[in-house]
Amino acid sequence: MVLMLGLRWSGLIKSLQFEEKSDRRTPFILVTLFYLLTTYFLMEKIELDPILWQGMGIITGSVALLTGVTFFWKMSAHMTGIGGLLAVLGVLGIYFPSLDLAYLLVATLVLGGLVASSRLYLEAHSPAEVYVGLFVGFVTCWIGFMWIYGF
């Protein structure tokens, strides 16, 4: 958040709401770099379970894809995150059937509906931007986490 405030105060972005596509580019690039560095540092820690850095790598890939799309179109970052979370819960439910993820899954679906509705109500996104964000986050994380767990 401090970085975003610095970008705003320096005039590199016009608003913290990222209303214009051009306002999203610099913050998204910087966030992607932070995710890449975090993934790299987790990978370099040999004593950590590889699933930790691999999972972070998948999430970083989703953020990088979102950033790439931002250069051409304004896809919903909120819904990309919700889609990714739904995918992770789905894969964990398949891989660990003894876990009872039903309440968490329902809560995430309700939260996702509220987030999507609020983005549409505030006219921050079009329906297509919301749906594509959800789809991209879900598919990226579903494929990535299924790969991690060897399906």
Image (cartoon, rainbow, N blue to C red):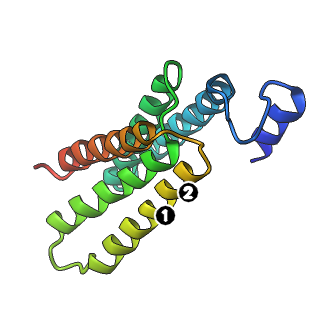
The percent coordinates of residue 114 (x first, y second) are 49, 64
- Most extreme residue toward the top is 72
**Label pair 2/1, CB-CB below 8 angstroms:** yes
Q: Nearer the viewer, residue 119 or 8?
A: 119
In this view, 40 is above or below 1: above
The percent coordinates of residue 86 (x first, y second) are 32, 59
Q: Return the mark for residue 31.
A: none
Q: Is residue 140 left or right of residue 78?
A: left
Label 2 residue SS: helix
Q: Residue placed at 42% from the left, 30% from the top?
A: 65
Quadrant of the image occupied by residue 136: top left
Label 1 residue SS: helix
Q: Residue placed at 24% from the left, 64% from the top?
A: 92
The percent coordinates of residue 80 (x first, y second) are 43, 45
Quadrant of the image occupied by residue 2: top right
| Residue type of the residue flagged with mark 1 | Leu
Q: Residues within 10 Å of mark 1 (few under 14, many from 20)?
A: few
According to the picture, the residue beneath numbered tag 1 turns out to be 114
| Residue type of the residue flagged with mark 2 | Ser
In this view, 21 is above or below 77: above
According to the picture, the residue beneath numbered tag 2 turns out to be 118
Gap between marks 2 and 1 measured at Cα:
6 Å
Q: Is residue 41 left or right of residue 94?
A: right
